[in-house]
C-alpha cells in the first residue's frame, strides 16, 4: 500500500507529490502522457497575479504563491540540480483602448505612454499607457517540469508514466481503488490533479479552455520584460526565445493550431512589439486550461473522505503551484483545513 496516490503528473500533481514526500509520505504518481497537451507543458510560465488582474481572495492567494516562489525554486534546484528559468523580470501591461486607459489611470502602478516607452524601448505606437508591475515575473514551465520530475525521482516518488486511470472505484464515502491501464491500484489517500480532464473521472464542474501559442526567436535579446497586453502576452526567455500567447477558446478538446488563432496572436504581438515581424517562428502549440466556476481552483475535501481535490487552476496553475502543494500537504499530513476553496 502506498500512502498517497496522485492522479495526474502536471505541475499540480508533481509539486504536491514532492511536498507530501518531503513531509514523510510514500507517494506514487499516475500519469498517462507527461508531454501531451497538459496545460503545464503548454503554458507561458508567467507568475502574474497582478497582470492577470486577479482580485479579492484569489489575488491574495496568487501574491502569496508568488512570494513562495524563490524558496520553492531553491528547494527544487537543490533536489534536481537543474535550472528552472525562474526570472523576476517584471511586466509591463499596456492598454490599447482609451476607455481602458481612463479606468486604470488612477491605479498606483499606472505609468504614462511616454514612461512606458522609456521603460521598454521598441513598443508599438498603439500603446496609450501601462501598468508597471515589477514583482510579476516568469518561470520556464518546460524546464520546471523536467526539474520537478528529477526532484520527484530523487525523493523516490514512484512515477507510473504511460498509465491511464480509467475509473475511480468508490463506495458511498471512500475511494476503494483505481482501475488503470496497469491494473488495479490501491492507496490510503488519493489526490485528484487531472487538470482539464477531471470530469472524465469525477462529476466536477471543470471544463477545458484551449489556448494556442507560438514562439519566435529574438537573436538580439533586447526584450527583457514580459509585455502583457489585452488578448496577447509576449514572454521573453533568457535564451532568446519569445513565447507569444494565447487564445481563449471554449470548444472542448478540439486539437490543433488554426490559421486564425496564430494570425490573431501574431497581428496583436507585432502591433505591440513591432520587432517581432522580422523574427523567425520556432514553434506553434496548444494546450487546455482547467477552468472551474468563478475561475477559483477546487482544492481540498471531496465527497469521498480519502480523495483530495487539486484541480481547476485555470489561467494561473504555474503561479499557484507552490501554495497549492503546501495547502494540500498541510491538509493531508497535518489535518489543517483549507481556508480558501471553491465551494461548488
Ligand atoms: P495539467 O498540466 O493539465 O496536468 C494534468 C495531468 O493529468 C496531465 O498530464 C494529464 O495527462 C493527466 N491526466 C488527466 N487525466 C488522467 C487520467 N485519467 N489518467 C492519468 N493521467 C491523467 N498558468 C500560469 O500560472 N502562468 C501562465 O503563464 C500560464 N499560461 C498558460 C498558457 C496556456 C496556453 C495554457 C493552456 C495554460 C496556461 N496557464 C498558465 C495555466 C496553467 O498551465 C495550468 O493552470 C496548470 O498547468 C494546471 O496544472 P495541472 O497539473 O492541474 O494540469
Ligand atoms: N495565464 C495565461 C494564459 O492562461 O493564457
Image: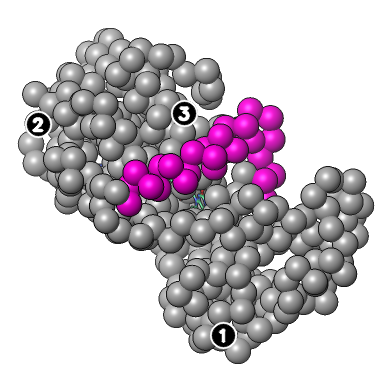
Mark on residue 322? none
Residue 69: say if magenta. yes
175, above or below 146, in the image: above
Residue holding disc 3:
298
> Image quadrant for the N terminus?
top left
Between tags 1 and 2, which lies in front?
A: 1
Residue holding disc 1:
220
Q: Residues within 10 Å of mark 3 (few under 14, many from 20)?
A: many
- Of the two numbered discs 1 and 2 on the same chain, state the one appearing first in sequence: 2
* Residue 196 vs residue 44, the one in the foreground: 44
- Of the two numbered discs 3 and 2 on the same chain, state the one appearing first in sequence: 2
Q: Residues within 10 Å of mark 1 (few under 14, many from 20)?
A: few
x and y percentages locating residue 52 in the rendered image: 65, 48
Where on the picture, by quarter, is residue 167? top left
Which element carries disc 1, helix, strand or loop?
loop
* Residue 305 vs residue 109, the one in the foreground: 109
Q: Main secondary structure of the magenta part?
A: helix
Q: Are marks 3 and 1 in contact (CB under 8 Å)?
A: no
The residue under the point 60% across, 38% down is 63
Where on the picture, by quarter, is residue 22? top left
Residue holding disc 2:
184
x and y percentages locating residue 230 in the rendered image: 71, 59
Which element carries disc 3, helix, strand or loop?
strand
The residue under the point 45% across, 75% down is 239
Residue 37: say if magenta. no
- Of the two numbered discs 3 and 1 on the same chain, state the one appearing first in sequence: 1
x and y percentages locating residue 106 in the rendered image: 90, 46
- Give the magenta-colored segment's residue range: 50-77
77, above or below 328, in the image: below
Q: Residues within 10 Å of mark 2 (few under 14, many from 20)?
A: few
Amino acid at each position: 500500500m502506498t500512502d498517497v496516490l496522485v492522479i495526474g503528473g502536471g505541475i499540480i500533481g508533481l509539486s504536491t507529490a514532492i511536498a507530501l514526500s518531503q513531509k514523510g509520505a510514500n507517494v506514487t504518481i499516475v500519469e498517462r502522457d507527461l508531454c501531451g497537451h497538459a496545460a503545464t507543458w503548454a503554458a507561458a510560465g508567467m507568475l502574474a497575479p497582478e497582470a492577470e488582474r486577479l482580485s479579492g481572495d484569489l489575488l491574495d492567494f496568487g501574491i502569496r504563491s508568488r512570494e513562495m516562489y524563490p524558496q520553492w525554486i531553491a528547494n527544487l534546484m537543490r533536489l534536481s540540480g537543474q535550472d528552472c528559468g525562474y526570472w523576476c523580470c517584471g511586466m509591463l501591461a499596456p492598454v490599447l483602448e482609451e476607455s481602458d486607459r481612463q479606468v486604470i489611470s488612477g491605479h498606483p502602478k499606472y505609468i504614462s505612454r511616454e514612461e512606458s516607452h522609456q521603460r521598454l524601448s521598441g513598443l508599438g505606437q498603439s500603446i496609450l499607457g501601462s501598468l508597471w508591475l515589477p514583482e510579476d515575473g516568469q518561470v520556464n514551465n518546460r524546464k520546471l517540469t523536467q526539474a520537478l520530475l528529477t526532484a520527484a525521482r530523487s525523493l523516490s516518488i514512484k512515477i507510473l508514466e504511460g498509465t491511464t486511470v480509467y475509473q475511480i472505484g468508490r463506495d458511498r464515502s471512500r475511494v476503494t481503488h483505481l482501475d488503470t491501464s496497469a491494473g488495479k491500484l490501491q492507496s490510503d489517500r488519493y489526490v485528484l490533479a487531472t487538470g482539464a480532464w477531471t470530469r472524465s473521472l469525477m462529476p466536477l464542474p471543470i471544463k477545458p479552455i484551449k489556448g494556442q501559442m507560438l514562439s519566435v526567436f529574438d537573436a538580439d535579446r533586447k526584450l527583457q520584460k514580459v509585455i502583457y497586453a489585452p488578448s496577447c502576452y509576449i514572454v521573453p526567455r533568457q535564451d532568446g526565445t519569445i513565447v507569444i500567447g494565447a487564445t481563449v477558446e471554449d470548444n472542448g478538446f478540439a486539437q490543433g493550431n488554426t490559421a486564425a488563432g496564430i494570425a490573431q496572436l501574431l497581428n496583436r504581438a507585432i502591433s505591440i512589439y513591432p520587432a517581432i515581424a522580422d523574427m523567425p517562428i520556432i514553434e506553434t502549440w496548444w494546450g487546455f486550461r482547467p477552468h472551474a466556476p468563478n475561475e477559483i481552483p477546487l482544492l481540498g475535501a471531496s465527497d469521498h473522505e480519502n480523495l483530495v481535490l487539486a484541480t481547476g487552476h485555470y489561467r494561473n496553475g504555474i503561479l499557484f503551484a507552490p501554495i497549492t502543494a503546501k495547502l494540500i500537504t498541510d491538509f493531508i499530513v497535518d489535518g489543517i483545513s483549507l481556508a480558501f476553496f471553491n465551494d461548488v
